[in-house]
Structures are given as structure tokens and as C-alpha cells.
Amino acid sequence: MKKMIRTAAAAGCLLLLTAVPALAHKPSPDEALTMLKEGNARFVAGTPSHPHSDSARLIQAGTESQADHAIATILGCSDSRVPLERLFDAGIMDLFVIRIAGNVVDVDEAGSIEYGLAHVNTPVLVVLGHTQCGAVTAVTDAVQGHGHALERNIPPLVDNIAPAVKRAIAQHPEAKGKDVVPFGIEENVWQGIEDLFLSSPATRELVKSGKVKVVGAIYDVGTGTVKWLPEANTAVLLKKAEANPKRATKAMAGDH
């Protein structure tokens, strides 16, 4: 009987020790970005800590708001080689994740991002492309005249990628055939950010206020490494969107 009591007491103490409290405050955009970079470094090194993955975190997930915990919104590709939480060594309620083939930004994705930034209160948005992206490769083939028939719903999905591929071809005339794809993958990240800024006044305001940072990155499916793209480009795209007369101007649904 005493052994059972000691075992129960020990289990209770362990639960108290492993329970993870809500963040005292959300990290700043720069702090959150550093946390993501450190998580990816652990993943690449093969020393992940697998945080926030125990039963205590599940209890929190069922009783607390994700807005008190999530540190980043991630827009990534649906590709099975890109496990978003794992590659950032993140756990339950750490990331607000949106996955779509080609990591494109259209109405559904922009709305999901707005929710992640404005309601889950994440201080960082990462638009994450990846090497060997099938969507960018397919669009590159089509633009170069080597495309093939696709199922009816795929072309509208990847239409947003075409401008990025065309820019990549124009900017890198030395690249031929499949050699264009890596350039197209990076341009597609910037295309997603530009499309977001054009369609989301709420995101523009959050970035201008300093509450949110938007960054682009590319994940290498062969090494696990995240390559972070120049943050200065995001500011250029924001300024470009602000000057575009076709930009959306009403931040809230129902505004007239």
C-alpha cells in the first residue's frame, strides 16, 4: 500500500514538473524567428528536443487557447517531405500551420494567414518553399512548352506560380530546362508574399506596426536545412503592394 502511495505521489510530482505553463508573454518577431532557427538547427544536427509533445501539453491543448502559445504561422507545401513541425523541432500548439501544394497564397490561404496573425497572435509568418517542388517543376515545364495534361482542379491551383517562373526565366537566361526550377522556387516564395500583401490589408498593417514579421525561406528536402531569404526583400514587396492601386484596401469583412 505504501509503495502504491509513493508511486502515485511520484507520478503527481512528475506531472507537475512536466506541465508546461503558458508563455508569460509572446516572443517578439525577432525572438520567435530565432526560436525557429534554433529548432531547425537541432533538427539538422539530429538532436531535436521534441518539445511540447507529452500528455501535459495535450491537457493544455484541451483547456487553453492556442493564442497563448503559438509562436509562428507557417505557410508551407503539402509535400510529404516537408514535415513543418518536425523541421522546426516544434510541438503541439507551437505553430499555426497552413499547407497547400506549391505554398501559394490565394483567398483561402490569405484568410488562414490572417487568422493566424490576428487571432492566434503569432508574431512571425514564414512562407516556406522547398527544393524539388513538384508544383514549381510542373509550371516550369508548362511555361517552357513541355507541359502535360493535368487533372481539372490542378491548373487553377498552380496558376499563381506562373508569374514567379516567368520572372525566374527572364532573370536567369543562362538557365535552361530543369535548371530554372531552383530559381523558380525562390521566386515563388516572393510571389506568395507579394500576393498576400496585395490581398490582405490586415497583414500589411500588422507588419507596418512592427507586431508581425514576414519572412521567406526554402527548405532543403535532402539535408533538412532551412535557408532564410533576405528580409529586406519583404520590405520592398510591402512598399510595392502599398503603391499598387489594385491592392485590397478594406481590412475587415463587411467593410464598404
Image: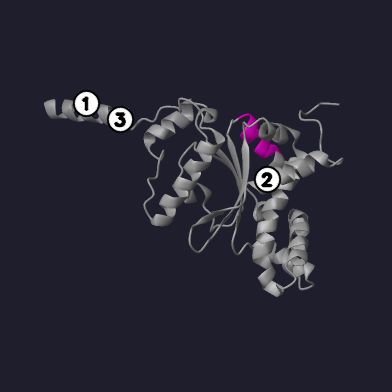
Disc 1 packing (10 Å; few <14; some 14–19; many ≥20)? few
Residue named by callout 3? 17
Q: x%, y% of residue 224?
A: 48, 58
Q: Is residue 160 above or below residue 62?
A: below
Q: Nearer the viewer, residue 148 or 171?
A: 171
Extreme residue in the left direction: 2
Q: Report which residue position mark 1 lands on.
A: 9
Q: How many marks?
A: 3
223 sits left or right of 17 in the view: right
* Residue 205, placed above or below residue 224: above
Q: Position of residue 79 (x, y in %)?
A: 59, 57
Question: Residue 234, which numbered label?
Answer: 2
Q: Amino acid at mark 1?
A: Ala
User: Mark 3 or mark 1, which is nearer to you?
Assistant: 3
Mark 3 and mark 1: Cα distance apart in space? 12 Å
What amino acid is at disc 2?
A: Thr
The reply to whether dot 1 and dot 2 touch (C-beta < 8 Å) is no
Per the model, the C-alpha gap separating discs 1 and 2 is 53 Å
What are the residue bounds of the magenta stretch? Answer: 111-119
Quadrant location, the N terminus:
top left
Report the predominant secondary structure element of the magenta stretch.
Answer: helix
Spatial CA span between label 2 and label 3: 41 Å
Residue at image position (39%, 56%) is 45
Q: Considering only vertical position in the picture, is 116 above or below 126?
A: above
Quarter of the figure with residue 20: top left
